Structures are given as structure tokens and as C-alpha cells.
Image (spheres, grey):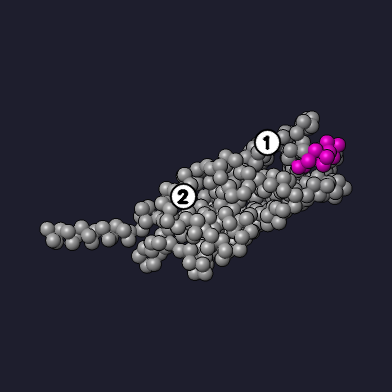
């Protein structure tokens, strides 16, 4: 019996040290949940003593629900502008002696799956969105650039470019925009930082196509914001999506003057032209019709582009004969269909 008791005690000790779900989260899983870089968690542990109670074999950190509660409080305080050292002291005091059930919000005990959704989101009005938006929003509010980079890279890797854009990047960008609009200029730096990193993530997944080995090659899709429009991120997402499909593009970005846009169309001979307008004041149907009527080539074999109108600025405008997608997925389907069907320019 003594041998059995000794074995039972040894087994209990082994289970207590085992890095399973009961021992808590790994540093990487916790970082994704909180929207911080793993290096930030290690730095907080080293500088402020906010570390895990359990360490697995090889001193790997395992974060218990109590640890998670302290770190969530730390994140809330630093997001509100409290200095890290003071935030750490307050977070430890606020959860000292409390049971895990009392300090850990409902739904945070198990590691979230990629498709789980939450109504939480730090100080941003996210609504019912993917769990990844929560971490991205928290990182953006803290101006934690490394964590923002990690969150964006993980979203693209886990879900693909299109889903990451539509269900992670866009909801978070909209939440930042709403917060900025309701708080004066307090969150403009958050929007600028998040937009810059989103743009970088999209460009990292944009691969220029090599020169075609056969001729004639189909004309590219030309992407441009209308004059006066600077919101180019949706076009950057479309550009990246087209490149993923192996389709040729020419990206011109924000606020392209009409004369320059017309000259580019006649010089390049694009299969399609995507025009983005975020606001109704920038959306010009005469400009869109002018581009749709632009021609190139020799007499008797002239081509015209298909025009795609993207953005809320075009809502309610009668863009007859032009493509009107309502999402990135739909825009990619429409444009790839032009190339797949071999449709001549202007025939859609």
C-alpha cells in the first residue's frame, strides 16, 4: 500500500506539472487572446513580476485562469493610458485572493478557436465579431506595433487573405473609425497605426507576376481611387486577392486625377478598371462613364475596359452596365470571371 500511495503521489505530481489544458495556456495562445506580442508577456514577467504560476518541463510558461485575469486587467489599464508599472501593481491587487471563477470573465477559460466570436473588444465598439478582432483591437489601442503585426499575420495565415480582410481587418478598422468619430481626435493615432500595418500585411501578400511567356497576354486590372479619395486599403486588398489568383494588376492608389487615369487606361489597355469611392461626394458617375468609354487599339479592333465600382460612395448611383460588387469575395469572382471566360474588354 505504501508503494501504491507513493506511486499515486508521484502520478499526482506528474499531472500537476503536465502541460495540459488544466495547467493553463501557453504564452503564444495567451498572447493571441490578449492581443499582445509574446515578448511583451515575457517583458512584463521580468520587469513587473506578472508571471505564470505554473511552468512546465523546460521552464515553459503555462498561464492559469488567475494569471489570465491579472494580465487582462493589465491590458485594460495600459490601454487606458496607465503606466505599465502602476498598471501591474493595480492588476495584482485587484485579483489577489479572488477565485478564478470570480476574476476571469465568462468564456475566457479555454483557448478560443479561430471562428469563435465575442462582443468584447477593449475600449472599441466591435460588436459581434471574430475573436481575433478582440486581440487586434487591444493591440491597436495600446499602439503595440509588434502585437498588431503578429495578429494580422496570424489572421491571414489561419484564415486566408479574403476572410482575414473581411472578418478581421475591416471590423476592427470600422470600430477604430467609430471610436475616433465619437471621441474627437483621441484615437486618430490608433487608426493611423492600424491602417499602416494593415497596408503592410496586404502588401506582403501581394506578389508581382513574372512577365508572361506567351502572347498576347490579357490586359491587367487597373485599380485606382477616384479624385479626392484617399482611402486605398480596400483596393490594396483587392489587388492582393487578384495577385493570389495569378491575375495581372496595376495599382495606382489614392486620389488619381481624371487626366492621369484616362492616360493610363489608353496606354495599358486594361481588361477592367476598379474605381473606389468611400464617400458620395467623391463618387462621380460622369468620370466612371468617361473611363468606360475610353478606347485603345487600332481602328476596327478597339478595346474598352469593364468598369467596377467599389465602395459605399456609389450606393444608389445608377451605374448601368458596370460591375457593382458588395464584398471583396464578389469583386474577385467578377473580375476572375472576365479572365476565365476570355471575355473581350467591354463585353461584360
Specify the principal SS of the magenta part. Answer: loop
Task: State if disc 1 and disc 2 touch (CB < 8 Å).
Answer: no
Q: How many C-alpha atoms fall within 10 Å of the one at disc 1: few (<14), some, or many (≥20)?
A: few
Task: Tell me, yes or no, whether the highlighted magenta stretch contains residue 284.
Answer: yes
Task: Tell me, yes or no, whether the highlighted magenta stretch contains residue 8.
Answer: no
Describe the element under mark 2 as helix, strand or loop. loop
Q: Quadrant of the N terminus?
A: bottom left
Q: How many C-alpha atoms fall within 10 Å of the one at disc 2: few (<14), some, or many (≥20)?
A: many
Residue at the location (48% across, 63% down)?
Answer: 50
Q: Which residue is mark 1?
A: 326
In this image, 34 relative to 228: left or right?
left
Q: Quadrant of the C terminus?
A: top right
Residues at marks 2 and 1, CA–CA distance in whole angstroms: 39 Å
Answer with mark 2 or mark 1, whichever residue precedes in sequence: 2
Residue 67: % across, % down: 45, 57
Q: Quadrant of residue 305?
A: top right
Residue 120: % across, % down: 56, 45
Using the rendered image of the protein, determine whether residue 327 is visible from the camera's viewpoint. Answer: yes
Residue 243: % across, % down: 64, 50
Describe the element under mark 1 as helix, strand or loop. loop
Q: Which range is magenta?
A: 277-289
Using the rendered image of the protein, determine whether residue 30 is visible from the camera's viewpoint. Answer: no
Amino acid at each position: 500500500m505504501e508503494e501504491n500511495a507513493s506511486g499515486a503521489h508521484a502520478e499526482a505530481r506528474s499531472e500537476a506539472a503536465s502541460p495540459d489544458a488544466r495547467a493553463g495556456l501557453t504564452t503564444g495562445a495567451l498572447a493571441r487572446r490578449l492581443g499582445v506580442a509574446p515578448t511583451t508577456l515575457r517583458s512584463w514577467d521580468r520587469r513587473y513580476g506578472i508571471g505564470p504560476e505554473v511552468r512546465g518541463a523546460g521552464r515553459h510558461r503555462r498561464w492559469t485562469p488567475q494569471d489570465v485575469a491579472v494580465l487582462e486587467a493589465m491590458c485594460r489599464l495600459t490601454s487606458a493610458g496607465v503606466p505599465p508599472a502602476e498598471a501591474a501593481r493595480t492588476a495584482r491587487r485587484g485579483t489577489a485572493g479572488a477565485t478564478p471563477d470570480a476574476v476571469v470573465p465568462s468564456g475566457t477559460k479555454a483557448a478560443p478557436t479561430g471562428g469563435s466570436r465575442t462582443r468584447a473588444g477593449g475600449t472599441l465598439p466591435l460588436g459581434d465579431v471574430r475573436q481575433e478582432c478582440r486581440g487586434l483591437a487591444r493591440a491597436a489601442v495600446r499602439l503595440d506595433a509588434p502585437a498588431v503585426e503578429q495578429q494580422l499575420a496570424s489572421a491571414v495565415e489561419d484564415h486566408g487573405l479574403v476572410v482575414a480582410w473581411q472578418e478581421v481587418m475591416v471590423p476592427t478598422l470600422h470600430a477604430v473609425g467609430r471610436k475616433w468619430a465619437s471621441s474627437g481626435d483621441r484615437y486618430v493615432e490608433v487608426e493611423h497605426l492600424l491602417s499602416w500595418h494593415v497596408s503592410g500585411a496586404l502588401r506582403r501578400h501581394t506578389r508581382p507576376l513574372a512577365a508572361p511567356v506567351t502572347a498576347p497576354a490579357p490586359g491587367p486590372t487597373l485599380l485606382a481611387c477616384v479624385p479626392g479619395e484617399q482611402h486605398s486599403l480596400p483596393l490594396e486588398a483587392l489587388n492582393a486577392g487578384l495577385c493570389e489568383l495569378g491575375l495581372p494588376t496595376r495599382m495606382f492608389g489614392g486620389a488619381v486625377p481624371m487626366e492621369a487615369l484616362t492616360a493610363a487606361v489608353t496606354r495599358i489597355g486594361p481588361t477592367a478598371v476598379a474605381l473606389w469611392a468611400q464617400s458620395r461626394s467623391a463618387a462621380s458617375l460622369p468620370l466612371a462613364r468617361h473611363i468606360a468609354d475610353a478606347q485603345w487599339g487600332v481602328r476596327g479592333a478597339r478595346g474598352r475596359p469593364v468598369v467596377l465600382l467599389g465602395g459605399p460612395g456609389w450606393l444608389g448611383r445608377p451605374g448601368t452596365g458596370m460591375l457593382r460588387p458588395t464584398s471583396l469575395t464578389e469583386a474577385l469572382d467578377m473580375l476572375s470571371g472576365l479572365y476565365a471566360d476570355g471575355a473581350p474588354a467591354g463585353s461584360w
